[in-house]
């Protein structure tokens, strides 16, 4: 589970979340200015001075919050992020324990240390790759609250890594309301599998303001979990399995004929 943001006031949490969004945009703009200066563009001295001051100020503020969080040593309960993903997988495994797909082999993987660098996913992806394994990967992260289902389409600001377009289209077929989501930090488990070349997709649930406010905080508790969201995600995955089976069957018939 993630180290909790050190703020207990919900107002401060809202302010922190907004500030982090702004800081990320500032970082992108400053890196662009730095790149222009590095390649030889002559930029106004005042602009460079202002950029340097803003970079130092924002970096110092971010570092202060991180060190304060280390000093308080609190951890998020992790109900939405990501006990919800575990719950959905367990429900799906129970469903298919008695009625296994005919043309599709399913595996269920529970990884650790995603919050400190996706080490669990990376270790499995490396080992699976070394053994010559081949599989489509679907990552579930934060699927416990909200009425909007999104699939990660790409991740990263510069040179983003992209999820598998074919898998994403299958998700859209299974659940037409699903919409694309662009990530920026490359910190999810899906990134580890994409780097190893596995066709990978990732699902998230959105639309719950309370769940989004509780992200990486002490408020990410079981009270936030929504049974209707679980039903939505599980049904989507069941339908996705049917879509994948149909594609396998169609391929088999094409090869036969």
Image (tube, rainbow, N blue to C red):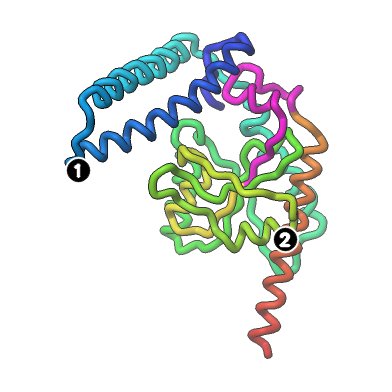
Q: Residue at x 51, y 36 (%)?
A: 114
The numbered mark at residue 22 is: none
Examine the image and state in which quarter residue 8 appears: top right
User: In the image, residue 128 lies at what x, y percent?
Assistant: 48, 56
Is 148 rendered above or below residue 153?
above
Left or right: 129 as drawn, with respect to 217: left
Examine the image and state in which quarter residue 9 appears: top right
User: Under tag 1, what secondary structure?
Assistant: loop
Camera-side residue: 195 or 41? 41
User: In the image, residue 180 lies at what x, y percent?
Assistant: 61, 49
Q: Which residue is drawn at 74% across and 35% down?
A: 146
Left or right: 137 as drawn, with respect to 161: right
Q: Mark 2 points at which residue?
A: 173
User: In the image, residue 26 lies at what x, y percent?
Assistant: 40, 28
The region drawn magenta spans 203-224
Q: From where the camera sits, is residue 253 visible?
A: yes
Q: Which of marks 2 and 1 is nearer the N terminus?
A: 1
Q: Name the residue under label 1.
A: 39
Image quadrant for the N terminus? top right
């Amino acid at each position: 589970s993630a180290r909790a943001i050190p703020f207990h006031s919900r107002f401060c949490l809202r302010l922190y979340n907004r500030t982090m969004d702004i800081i990320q945009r500032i970082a992108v703009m400053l890196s662009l200015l730095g790149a222009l200066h590095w390649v030889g563009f002559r930029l106004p001295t005042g602009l460079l001075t202002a950029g340097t001051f803003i970079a130092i100020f924002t970096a110092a503020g971010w570092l202060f919050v991180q060190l304060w969080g280390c000093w308080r040593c609190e951890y998020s309960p992790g109900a939405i992020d990501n006990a919800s993903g575990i719950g959905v997988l367990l429900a799906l495994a129970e469903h298919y324990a008695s009625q296994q797909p005919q043309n599709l082999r399913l595996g269920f993987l529970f990884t650790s240390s995603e919050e400190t660098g996706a080490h669990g996913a990376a270790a499995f992806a490396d080992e699976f790759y070394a053994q010559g394994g081949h599989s489509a990967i679907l990552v579930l992260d934060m699927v416990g609250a909200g009425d909007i289902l999104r699939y990660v389409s790409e991740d990263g600001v510069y040179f983003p890594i992209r999820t598998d377009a074919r898998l994403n289209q299958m998700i859209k077929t299974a659940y037409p309301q699903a919409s694309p989501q662009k990530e920026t930090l490359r910190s999810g488990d899906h990134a580890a599998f994409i780097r190893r070349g596995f066709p990978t997709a990732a699902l998230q649930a959105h639309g719950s303001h309370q769940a989004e406010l509780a992200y990486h905080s002490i408020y990410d508790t079981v009270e936030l979990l929504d049974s209707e969201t679980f039903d939505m995600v599980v049904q989507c995955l069941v339908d996705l399995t049917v879509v994948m089976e149909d594609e396998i069957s169609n391929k088999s018939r094409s090869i036969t004929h």
